[in-house]
Amino acid sequence: MTQPASRSVGHYQYEERDRAFLQERINEFEGQVRRRLSGELSEEEFKPLRLMNGVYLQLHAYMLRVAIPYGVLDSRQLHKLADVAAKYDRNYGHFTTRQNIQFNWIALKDVPTILRELAEVDMHAIQTSGNCIRNVTSDEFAGAAKDELMDPRIHAEIVRQWSTLHPEFTFLPRKFKIAISGSPEDRVAARFHDIGLLARPSENGPLFRLFVGGGLGRTPVVGQELFDSVKEEDLIATLEAVLRVYNAFGRRDNLYKARIKILVQTIGLEAFRKAVEEELARMDRAAYRLTPEHVAQIRARFALPDLKAPADASDVLEQHKKADPAFARWVASNTHPHQDEGHICAVISLKTPGDIPGDVTSEQMHGLADLAERHSFGEVRVTHLQNLVFGHVRKDQLHELWQGLKALGLAAPNVGLISDIVSCPGLDYCNLANARSLPLAQKLGARFGDAALQAEIGALSIHMSGCINACGHHHVGNIGLLGVDKRGAETYQILLGGDAGENAAIGGILGPSFAEDEAVDAVARIVEFYLGQRQKGETFSAMLKRCGLKAFKEVAYETV
Amino acid sequence: MKLFDLSGRKTLEAASPVPFAEWKDSQQGTAISLPQDVEVEELRPYLSSLTLIVLEFPVFRDGRAFTQARSLREYEGYKGEIRASGHLLPDQAIHLRRCGFDSVALSEDANVKDWEEQLGRYQFYYQNTAVSPV
Amino acid sequence: MKRLSRPGEGEILLLTASRLLDGRIVWLGEGEHWRESIAEATRFTYEDAGAALERALAEAEQKEVVAVYEVVAKDTQPPEPVTTREAIRAHGPSVHPDFSYDHAPVREKESAL
Ligand code: HEM
Ligand code: SF4
């Protein structure tokens, strides 16, 4: 079936009832703001209500976190985000690791109006914060990547809808994050979510491997496999059962022990599984069955790209690469193979060395939306590493896209390389921070900004958080940096050996923390040591295993 | 205290609830109140003699009673009245109703209009609950 | 109530909050009005600050501010908070000199210390 050309691809197309629902949600929030201003709601009562709609009180202003469900935006939505940034913020937005965009300078009184503007393009801030089921994240190459087993977005949308204003699970002990991937590569860090789902097809329909109890934060835990093969029809029932056990037994007396990971750790995986199975046994399964009809209905609201490329698209790309080494370098790091021979996925780095990771100006957003319209069926995805992806670019047009990106200042050839730094906002914006993270990320980016040097170093990730809440995922960076407060001074701990993917691992702490500039130097020495000592093709993690943390420690503290 | 009707049950139980722990000994009356940390399975032998179960919210953020109510309806098949009591916000009206609550005990000065408005807000919901299928 | 921070030698206390309507950082100034600039903040000694804070908290709803607390600052002209966090609140994010509240970016100030 062909779709009308105007339908943007990649995400669920709203119908009237979805739009009416959003309007009601905004009316509800508007009423809550009104009741807060009239004094009917205390700040203590209002806070959880505003959080459930993505509104935080930050260091300088309110922050509004807008959901980008499973990371897919269309060009119309990106234009709108650009408008919001220009009109209500300071002309920029910040893309996060959980496929959201944050505006840092919002006034509370403007929020209902902003939400109405966003609703015009079917966007919202529902459940982007608070102790509820959060925005569902997915694989940035979904429906495009060559290595994909199945497109996870249909089920991500089903989970999104199921979790929206869920009557039983809106006042949980703590937040609850679900991610879903359809790739054997696990590009969503499934093992670091409260629930991580890895989908795969089978003769009898999709199956889901379900991990539970993963997470970073104060107590980093690698999620454990609860079920190996959940059937599609049981997906919702199983999620219900896990959430019920959590809602009933998760701790509520201590904020830091309230995540599901602590419950699973405390009672043990076996006991937890038994509790979930008991729920499933008692449940009216018919009421929670995910029927093939329902799945088909949701699937029908996803438009697919009409992939047509000339037969010589790959050859043209090769010629462009030969003619332009800078372009070739960008292609080497910033693309990913597509299912279709004539297409390719392009990753747009939001980590121009020296700039703030994840920040995009309003002008850049408009420019990107136009490029997406021209080169990727109007579709833009947000990655969990704070970059953007154009999912379906014709190979023969990639060079043209790259030139467009260069004009926007968004053509840094560093995806997956050392200057592709993930960083949280840190003390410059965040109320909870111990130390700034952005200046350090900028310095590290600048230190390793040289394209040839980065290419030589190869794949290496740096992740940076301004406090133990780990929003920058410092535990899973090959090199992790954590801001700690040392008697009032900002200092930084270094962790080595983290990994977010199939070989999930939590980095080990190297030793005492460094001052900002010392930390930059220590990282530089660590990288130099790696370059000097690595064997052919050896990754950073592999060498760390071979040489041990101690060897790296000696290097890092050499001159300090 | 004034009672707010969530489910349209109309005749709300007037009996004063007795804490479950006390009631178990005497089994006097048909109305009990239940703290959030008791599993509703414990009520199973007594459910047929109960007409009102009051579930307590020490603070509105503590959502355990939502699961208690749903378990009472779905697993235990309890048909009597379920009432919410304690620190609650009108913003929770729909959640309460959809999890199987019939009524909420409000303080005398509570703004009933907010509760009514909230109850009528959404035209449809995204998920089934055994109490209110979509 | 939580104990007040104690200012050291040459330091004073200021009261700060966030404005309910727009989240803007404010400082308690003359006439117990909330001001946008730290330069207009009233200086309190440890002895005076407790009562002032209590009053400010009691009037927070009415004056439409939230998160009221005290900040230790050097008794300079204008007063300069001693922690980086409060310096960033007073002057703006260090990574965006163009967003500075007083066109004196924090990072330069710091290195001058
Ligand atoms: C600036 C405002 C922010 C605040 C106040 C904030 C607050 C928090 C807190 C308190 C936690 C820990 C919760 C827990 O473990 O129970 C957390 C976790 C997290 N935050 Fe943020 N955050 C902010 C910004 C961000 C940004 C910008 C990102 C993305 C770059 C982000 C991504 C995450 C992620 C992925 C986690 C989960 C770690 C885990 O799995 O436990 N946050 N955040
Ligand atoms: S890691 Fe800490 S400092 Fe960074 S955004 Fe999260 S809460 Fe704030």
Image: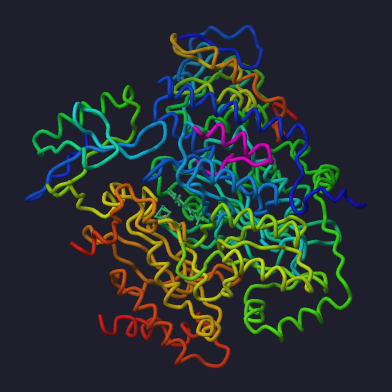
Would you identify the image quadrant in which residue A399 lies? Answer: bottom right
Residue drawn at x 93%, y 52% as measured from the top left: A1
Q: Is B37 within the magenta?
A: no
Q: Is residue A112 among what the camera can see? A: yes
Magenta-drawn segment: A110-131
Left or right: where A318 falls relative to A542: right
Left or right: where A50 falls relative to B13: left
* Residue A290 percent across, percent down from the top left: 78, 44
Decide: is A208 above or below A458: above
* Residue A557 percent across, percent down from the top left: 29, 81
* Residue A280 percent across, percent down from the top left: 68, 43
Residue drawn at x 40%, y 21% as measured from the top left: A39
Quarter containing the C terminus of chain A: bottom left
Number of dots carrying numbers: 0
Q: Nearer the viewer, residue A69 or B57?
A: A69
Q: Is residue A210 among what the camera can see? A: no
Left or right: where A206 falls relative to B111: right
Q: Nearer the viewer, residue A511 or A265?
A: A511
Q: Is A118 within the magenta?
A: yes
Left or right: where A18 falls relative to B80: right
Residue extending furthest toward the left: C9
* Residue B118 percent across, percent down from the top left: 59, 21
